[in-house]
Amino acid sequence: MNIGAAARRSGVPAKTIRYYESVGLIAPAERTAGGYRVYERQDVETLRFIHRARGLGFSVAQVADLLALWKDRNRASADVKSMALGQISAIQRKIAELEAMRNTLEELAERCQGDSRPECPILNDLAEAQD
């Protein structure tokens, strides 16, 4: 199948498929005499795997490690679990950062009168140097 069909079946845009090929996440596709990429069912399965892993927040480098584990039938599931637990910790840190951002914005919005006067504690806070 061509790259457009592989993109539709995997949920990964064609541009991203080319990127994954360029960084080595997927093997370079076979080419037709006309130079068009040709993908097999297995390539689509790999792209779906990558798409799902990226959707869970794994970096490209982490996805490469996960792919290696996925393909290694002698892998230890402890290695996979360790990666998942590490990702959970990273997500929890991001959640805490986002909650702190939300709390700050809520506090600033509450202090702002939101009327026709020019005074604005939101802009004043943004202008202050933060250490």
Image (cartoon, rainbow, N blue to C red):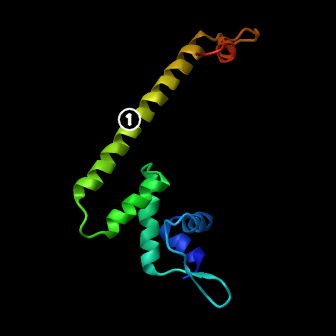
Tally of numbered discs? 1
User: 4 or 21, which lies in front?
Assistant: 21
User: 8 or 31, which lies in front?
Assistant: 31
Quadrant showing the C terminus: top right
The residue depicted at 64 percent of the width and 14 percent of the height is: 125
The residue depicted at 33 percent of the width and 63 percent of the height is: 69
Q: Quadrant of residue 111?
A: top right
Q: Quadrant of residue 120?
A: top right
The residue depicted at 49 percent of the width and 70 percent of the height is: 26
Which secondary structure, mark 1?
Answer: helix
Where 86 falls versus 93 (above or below)? Answer: below
Quadrant showing the N terminus: bottom right
Considering every residue shown, the one lying at the far bottom of the view is 33
User: At which x and y percent is residue 99?
Assistant: 46, 26
**Left or right, residue 113 beside residue 103:** right
User: At which x and y percent is residue 112?
Assistant: 63, 11
As shown in the figure, which amino acid type bears the numbered disc 1?
A: Gln
User: At which x and y percent is residue 70?
Assistant: 33, 66
The residue depicted at 52 percent of the width and 25 percent of the height is: 101
- The residue identified by callout 1 is 92
Density class for disc 1 (Cα within 10 Å; few <14, some 14-19, many ≥20) is few
**Left or right, residue 43 beside residue 35:** left
User: 68 or 118, which lies in front?
Assistant: 68
